[in-house]
Image (cartoon, rainbow, N blue to C red):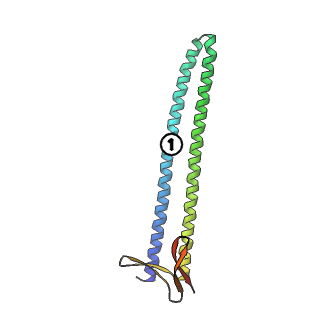
Amino acid sequence: MNLGELEQKIQEKQIQEKQLQEQAIITSLENFKENLSKSLKSVSTTIENDIKVLEVKNKELIKLSSKNYCIYLIGIFLLLFLIIAGSRLVTFYLENKIYKLEQQIQQLEQKKLTAQQVMKSLETLGIQLQSVDGKNFIVIPKELSYETGWKVGSNQAIRVYE
């Protein structure tokens, strides 16, 4: 495998990974959109049903005596308050979900940029990643020196220098 083929495979792999990431993000957003749509339809149906119930109760309220009128009126106001509070909670929940998804997208974009920078730095040093007979190797050019046994954080590392 020559350098040109390796670079082509690396580029193809990067393109595939980018496409997979983009597809995953699109799928996630589509699922979120579907869930949001279902939630909004459910909330809308609930509100419509509650409004119908309120309309029926309002007709019954007209027939009630003046003593019971105030009690039912307070109940209706409480019910309206609960409906409004519930829809506000649903809105808050959905806004929070959207915000978290936007943060995840930003984190994925940052990871992508970091990975691209690492690949560029490897290319400028001439370091190559190769797979031979199912075994993976890091190939270091002859003009570079290296030391094994290093650790970066809790990970094993190889120090490369000129």
Within 10 Å of disc 1 (Cα), the crowding (few <14, some 14-19, many 20+) is: few
**Who is closer to the viewer here, 152 or 135?**
152
- Which residue is outermost to the left? 133
Viewer-closest of 52 and 156: 156
Q: Which residue is mark 1?
A: 37
Q: Residue at x 57, y 52 (%)?
A: 100
Q: Residue at x 48, y 80 (%)?
A: 128
Q: Is residue 113 above or below residue 30?
A: below
Tell me the amino acid under the disc marked 1: Ser
Q: Which residue lies at the image location 50% right of the left edge and 37% below the top edge?
A: 41
Q: In the rendered image of this protein, does residue 161 appear above or below residue 9? A: below
Residue 70: x and y, percent? Answer: 64, 16
Compare residues 7 and 162 and report the one nearer the observer: 162
Image point 60% across, 23% down: which residue?
76
- In which image quadrant can residue 86 be found? top right
Image quadrant in which the C terminus is located: bottom right
The image position of residue 16, as x and y in percent, is 45, 66
91 vs 121: above or below: above
